Image (tube, helix red, strand yellow):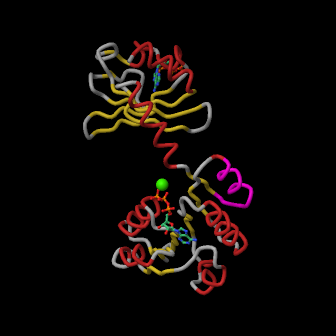
C-alpha cells in the first residue's frame, strides 16, 4: 500500500515537501487556509483542501488521523502550529514532523509530542556559512552539537597521496567515509586509496577534529 502523507501549510517549505513527495509517487493531502495556495496545488497533489489545521473537526472529517505521516509547515503563526501539532498528537498520528520558527517553538513542539522538529532556515544558514568560510567545504551536515559530516574538496596538499600516507584517522581521529570522483563514488575506501586533486572526501567525526583536519590539509 502507498504511504499517505498530509502537509498542513503550503508556504515555500510545505509546498516543496508536497511537490517532492508527489514526484516520488506518494499520496499527498495538502491543506491550507488560503484558497489560492490550495488551488495552486490541486494539480500537483492527490487532494488539496481548504481547512484550518487548528480546527479539530475539520481534520477529523478529512481523516487526517489515519495518515502515516503528517507534516506541519505553518510558519509565522506559532500558535496555530502548536495547536495543530497538539491535535495531531491527541489523534495518535504515528509520525508528526513540524517546522519550527525558533528555539522556543522547537522546545514546545518537542514537549507536546512532535516526533521530529525541523529548522530549515537555521540549518541551511549553518551549511552555507561553512561553505562561505572555507572554499573547500562543499556541504556540511550537523549530526549533533559535537559531530558532523563534511564534504571537502581535495586540493594540492593531499593530492597523489594515499590515506595511509596522510594517516588521517590516526592523526585527526576522523574517518573518510567515501571518496567521490566525478560520477563514481567509492564507499569505505581502503588505506591504499590514492586521492586525486578535485576528489570530494566525505568525512565523519567530531567537529573539533574535522576543523583540525581542514586547517592542516585543505
Ligand atoms: P515558508 O517559509 O515555508 O514560505 P512562511 O514562513 O512564509 O513559510 P507562512 O506563510 O506563515 O509561513 O505559513 C505557511 C503556510 O501556512 C501559509 O500558506 C499559510 O496560509 C498556512 N497557514 C497558516 N496558518 C494556517 C492554519 N491554521 N491552518 C492551515 N494552514 C495555515
Ligand atoms: P587503524 O589502525 O586506524 O584501524 P587500519 O588497521 O584500518 O588502521 P589501514 O587501512 O592500513 O589500517 O590504514 C592505515 C592508516 O591510514 C589508518 O590508521 C588511518 O590513519 C589511515 N586511513 C585508512 N583508511 C582511512 C579512512 N577511511 N579514513 C581516514 N583514515 C584512513
Ligand atoms: Ca519563512
> Does residue 50 appear to the left or right of 97 in the view shown?
left
On the image, the x and y values in percent for residue 177 come to 45, 33
Which stretch did the figure color magenta? 104-115
Q: Main secondary structure of the magenta part?
A: helix
Residue sitting at x 52%, y 24%? 174
Residue sitting at x 31%, y 19%? 155
Residue sitting at x 41%, y 79%? 46
Closer-to-camera residue (23/113): 113
Choose top left, top right, bottom left or bottom right for residue 94: bottom right
On the image, the x and y values in percent for residue 139 come to 41, 36
105 to 158, vertically: above or below:
below
Q: For the C terminus, give its image quadrant.
A: top left
Q: Is residue 211 magenta?
A: no
Closer-to-camera residue (147/90): 90
On the image, the x and y values in percent for residue 141 come to 49, 38
Residue sitting at x 67%, y 68%? 83
Closer-to-camera residue (192/104): 104
Q: Is residue 113 magenta?
A: yes
Amino acid at each position: 500500500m502507498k504511504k499517505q502523507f498530509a502537509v498542513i501549510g503550503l508556504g515555500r517549505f510545505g509546498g516543496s515537501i508536497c511537490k517532492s513527495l508527489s514526484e516520488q509517487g506518494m499520496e499527498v493531502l495538502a491543506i491550507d487556509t488560503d484558497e489560492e495556495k490550495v488551488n495552486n496545488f490541486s494539480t500537483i497533489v492527490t487532494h488539496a483542501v481548504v481547512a484550518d489545521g487548528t480546527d479539530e473537526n475539520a481534520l477529523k472529517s478529512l481523516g487526517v488521523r489515519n495518515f502515516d505521516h503528517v507534516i506541519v509547515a505553518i510558519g509565522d503563526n506559532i500558535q496555530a502550529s502548536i495547536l495543530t501539532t497538539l491535535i495531531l498528537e491527541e489523534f495518535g498520528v504515528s509520525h508528526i514532523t513540524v517546522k519550527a520558527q525558533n528555539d522556543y517553538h522547537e522546545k514546545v513542539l518537542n514537549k507536546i509530542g512532535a516526533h521530529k522538529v525541523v529548522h530549515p532556515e537555521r540549518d541551511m544558514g549553518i551549511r552555507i556559512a561553512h561553505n562561505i568560510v572555507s572554499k573547500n567545504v562543499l556541504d556540511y551536515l550537523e549530526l549533533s552539537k559535537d559531530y558532523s559530516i563534511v564534504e571537502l574538496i581535495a586540493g594540492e596538499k593531499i593530492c597523489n597521496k594515499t590515506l595511509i600516507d596522510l594517516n588521517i584517522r590516526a592523526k585527526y581521529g576522523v574517518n573518510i567515509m567515501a571518496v567521490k570522483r566525478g560520477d563514481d563514488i567509492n564507499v569505505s575506501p581502503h588505506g591504499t586509496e590514492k586521492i586525486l586533486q578535485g576528489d570530494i572526501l566525505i568525512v565523519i567525526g567530531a567537529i573539533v577534529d574535522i576543523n583540525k583536519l581542514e586547517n592542516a590539509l585543505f
